[in-house]
Image: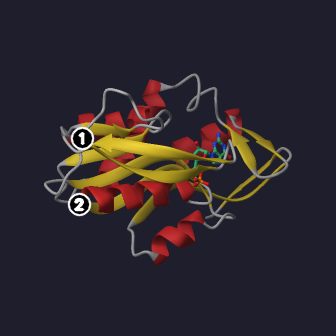
Amino acid sequence: MKLLKDRILKDGKSFDGGILKVDSFINHQMDPILMKSIGVEFVRKFGNLPINKIITIEASGIAPAIMLGYLLELPVVFVKKAVPKTMVNMVSTIAHSFTKDKDYTICVSKDFLNPNDKVVFIDDFLANGNAAIGIYNLIKEAGAELYGMGFIIEKSFQDGGQRLRELGIHVESLAKIKELGDNKIIFED
Ligand code: 5GP
């Protein structure tokens, strides 16, 4: 997606260790116009699938997921990263955080994810794939059906994409970065 790649080159900040900061337009301040274009691109990738719901995880997945849900006129459910005291009828699993380097519980109410659901999962980044594999397990646990996973940015020098594709998941990423270093961002073709 050219618009996205151009924006990453213009406003993204890359660091040694393979970290990309995009907090001026995705992760902290958000650009709704770009988000809408991201939603349109995800419609191109997933719009023909027989899904009834979009799934994401708080917090940074919510914006692109809601754009896709808006365009497809489908509900959007966000998986929670902490178990709310008020949630009783839920499924949960353990996921590992890349940015915080620790394990945490993710959960979702069975009212909103259950065997009636056919879903696409949307998130901001795909790195090692731990968050996405947590979601994959959660969707299985809930008895729902996963039709695909879409990411705004995939860091293809990390193995998340390969892990998900080996599980047979239909993965779509709007910008794939093959190399990240101090002030260096190189996309796949
Ligand atoms: P994974 O579980 O695939 O290793 O990492 C996924 C999550 O880690 C993403 O949802 C995102 O929040 C965070 N993440 C991974 N790599 C980066 C990065 O380079 N920059 C930012 N801003 N977040 C990242």
Q: Nearer the viewer, residue 95 or 48?
A: 95
Left or right: where 8 falls relative to 152? right
- Is residue 183 visible to us here? yes
Q: Is residue 173 visible?
A: no
Label 1 beta carbon within 8 A of ligand 1: no
Q: Is residue 50 left or right of residue 162?
A: left
Residue 115 image point, x, y percent: 17, 57
Q: Position of residue 69 (x, y in %)?
A: 27, 38
Which label number is shown at residue 104? none
41 is higher (above) or lower (below) than 63: below
Residue type, label 2: Gly
Report the residue that reaches farthest toward the left: 116
Which residue is found at the position 39% from the left and 61% from the top? 137
Q: Is mark 2 within 8 Å of ligand 1?
A: no
Q: Residue at x 36, y 38 (%)?
A: 78
Q: Nearer the viewer, mark 1 or mark 2?
A: 1
**Label 1 secondary element:** loop
For badge 1, the amino acid type reads Asn
Q: Which mark is residue 89?
A: 1
Residue at the farthest top position: 29
Q: Earlier in the sequence, mark 1 or mark 2?
A: 1
Report crowding for label 1: few under 14, some 14 to 19, many 20 or more residues within 10 A (C-alpha): few
Taking the spot 59% from the left edge, 25% from the top edge, the residue there is 28
* The C terminus, quarter of image: bottom right
Residue of label 2: 143
Q: Is residue 62 above or below residue 17?
A: above
Q: CA distance from mark 1 to mark 2?
A: 14 Å
Closer-to-camera residue (81/45): 81
Q: Secondary structure at mark 2?
A: loop
